[in-house]
Structure formats: structure tokens, C-alpha cells
Image: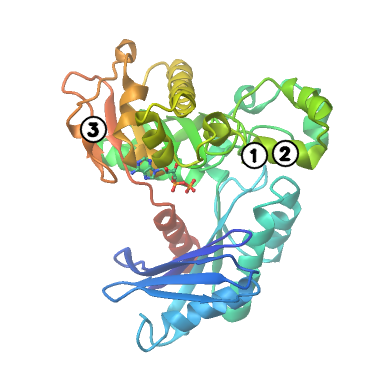
Amino acid sequence: MKVLVINCGSSSLKYQLFDIADENVLAKGLVERIGSDASQLTHQPKGKGKYVRETAIGEHQAAIKMVMDLLTDAQYGVLTDIREIEAVGHRVAHGGNVFSRSALIDDEVKQGIRKLAELAPLHNPPNLLGIEAAEKILPGVPQVAVFDTAFHQTIEPEAYMYSLPYELYEKYAIRKYGFHGTSHKFVAQRAAELMGKELSQIKVITCHLGNGASVTAIDGGVSKDTSMGFTPLEGLTMGTRCGDLDPAIVPFLMEKEGLDTTGISTLLNKKSGVLGLSGVSSDFRDIEQAASRGNERAQLAIDVFVHDVKKYIGAYAAILNGIDALVFTAGLGENSPEVRDAVCIDMDYLGIGLDKEKNGIRGKEMEVSAADSTVRVFVIPTNEELMIARDTKRLGLDT
Ligand code: ADP
């Protein structure tokens, strides 16, 4: 039972082919710089050598066709016929108020995703391109959309409403949506398994700390609040995104710096965050290295990030009336003992304590709480693709 998972960005396409019967990954890969003369395809079949090719790939359909050819290639393939693919799952960024769960794709679902492009202009259109390309190449094969926002649709109005004139909410659907939902849900479920409890019995704060970063408060498996908002710009300081700031800064800067809406949007989304603060890089590896060599702005960027994560944990512990578990995931959450340590220092008022030695691990699933920590602290590598594959099987093959 083969399920292909596709994550289409504006100029990239990531894929994983699962044998969903045993949740084994048969092949995975990435096409980068679609639309340029120097696109690159990296394909890693299980148990075989890696294939890398640089060539011009004009658009998403051509990229998917190349992936399909590779999946059935005599040397690098893992399938004898592409018709072995029984269902395709797509990561879709924005499901708005419309999609509170994954959906089997039909014309109405596509129309919904198209309409929501207004809320996610950088993400939903390429997601849709991926869906349409896969439909053309695999006609009749069930396709499923899994939304980054869906898990957060349980958030109550007091947490998702912004204090703007209510008519603007009605007119433009301006509210908190939240993102990274598939990841938060996956690691919360896994934490419950590791604790030997039902997810419905526990309260968890999940910290997805990657290039994009968000924290979520989960009570009994239900998302209660999350740090990203109407767009993925709100919340924590991120790689290049500013996170929370006083909204008055926006018109102030537009006026002082002579910026139009595109200019201010680029500043806040691409030039801010730890990149803007440090002036070094958006990548925490570079920043940690620079800080260790005495670069004060790099240290400042780390301090601001850590402060933000701590602040959201405190806020969400208050919302949840205490927590049973704290989970770190994504690039930085999984790989930076320093950040985890800095976040968890002086959190004993919440019952959070880290075991320094265990916390030294990188990129592995591990409980890292101290023996006397009343809150269980976990590092859990996220696996959004597996979640998408599971939903794709459930909606595309089991019904
Ligand atoms: P995204 O999927 O949002 O692009 P990732 O989850 O891959 O991002 O996370 C990328 C971030 O994780 C980068 O800032 C990177 O520096 C950080 N990261 C990855 N590995 C390490 C590491 N070994 N030490 C510190 N930071 C790391």
C-alpha cells in the first residue's frame, strides 16, 4: 500500500513515498529552485545510493513527472509501476475557517484552497499547483489535503479574536489561525505514548522551534492557543521573521523609511528575526558559533529568542492551569541542547527541570527531564510527512 506525500513550496517540492502498511519510507527527496535554469533534484531511495541532478525544471508538473520517473527508475527506483501509488497526500498551508480536518480532494476542496490563497498568497497557490500536477500524472488516484491550520481550529474565540472592529473579522476573516498544526499534533501524541497515557488525559506545551517557530498549548489533545496568528509572522522571534511587535511600529517605519506594503512586508518577514538582530545569519548554528566567539549581537539574538519561548511557555501554562509535559521539536528544538537548557532554566516554579546529561542529545527522541521534575520534558523529532501519510490512508484508502 504505497502513499506519496508531497509538500510543494513556491520554488521547491519535497516528497516521501511510504509503504503505509508498515509506515516505512521507501524513498524521499527534494526538488529545489523550480523555475530556474539550475534546479536541483535530490532523491534518496531506501537502501540505495543517493541521486542528485542539476537541470532546468520549469514548473511543478515537470518536477513531479521527474520524481515519478525516478521512483520507477531501474537503478534508483523503488516501484515497478507508478500505478502502485494508491493515494497522494498534500501539505496545504492554509485551511482558514473552512477546513478543520484533512479533506479528500475534489473540485469543491480545490476551490476552497484557491479562495484561501488570499490569506496565504505565498503558500496556497503552490500547494494547489502540486495537487493539480499530481492529478494529471496520477488520474483517478485519491488525493488528500492536510492543512497546517486544521489542528488549531479548536481554539476558542477569546484566544483567536484580535481586538479590532468586529466588522473586519466578518469582512476579511481576520483572526488567529495558527500553523505547524500537523507537527504540534504529532509530537503531542507521541509524548502521550511515551508517558503511557491517553492524549485526552494530559496537558502539553509543544515548542516547534525551526526556521519558523511556534508554541502551542494543548489540553486533552485539543489546541487551546498557539503563538502564530493570522499569518506565520506572529509569535516568537524566528529565523527572519519579527514575531510579536507593537503594531504602531509598522506605520512608523513605513513613514520613516519610505516603505510601501511590499517593502514593510519584506522587512518583517525576511530581514528581521534573529537574522536582523544578529546581522550574522538566520541559521542558529552560525549564530551560536558567532556568540561563542564573543559576538554580542549574536548573543542578543539568542537571548531574545529564548526569552520569547520562555514567555509563551509561562503564558500557556497559565492558560492550561499547569502542564504535564513540555515537548521540543523541529531543527532547533531537536538539535540545540543550549537553547533547551536556556529555556528551561529557572522554570522550577512550574515544576520543569532538565537533566543536563540527557539534554546533551541531538536529533533523537529522548526524555530529558530531571528525576525530580514534575513536568516531563521530551525531545521528539517531528514527522509531518508521516502524519500526512496516515491521514491520506484514512481518507483516501480506508473509506
Ligand atoms: P524549517 O523546516 O522551518 O525550515 P527546521 O525545522 O529545519 O526549519 O529548523 C531549522 C533551524 O534549526 C535552523 O535555524 C538551524 O540552525 C537549526 N538547527 C538545525 N540543526 C542544528 C544544530 N545541530 N544546532 C543548532 N541549531 C540547529
Q: Nearer the viewer, mark 3 or mark 1?
A: 1
Report whether 185 appears left or right of 342.
Answer: right
Q: Secondary structure at mark 2?
A: helix
Q: Position of residue 321 (x, y in %)?
A: 42, 16
Is residue 139 something that shows in the picture? no
Contact (Cβ within 8 Å) of mark 3 with mark 2: no
Q: Which residue is mark 3?
A: 359
Picture layout, residue 264 above or below residue 112? above
Asked if disc 2 is less than 8 Å from ligand 1, the answer is no
Q: Earlier in the sequence, mark 3 or mark 2?
A: 2
Q: Nearer the viewer, residue 304 or 74?
A: 304
Q: Which residue is mark 2?
A: 265
Residue at 49% across, 79% down: 68
How many other residues sit within 10 Å of disc 2, few (<14), some (14-19) or many (≥20)?
Answer: some
Q: Amino acid at mark 1?
A: Asn
Q: CA gap, disc 3 to disc 1?
A: 31 Å
Q: Earlier in the sequence, mark 3 or mark 1?
A: 1
Q: Amino acid at mark 3?
A: Asn
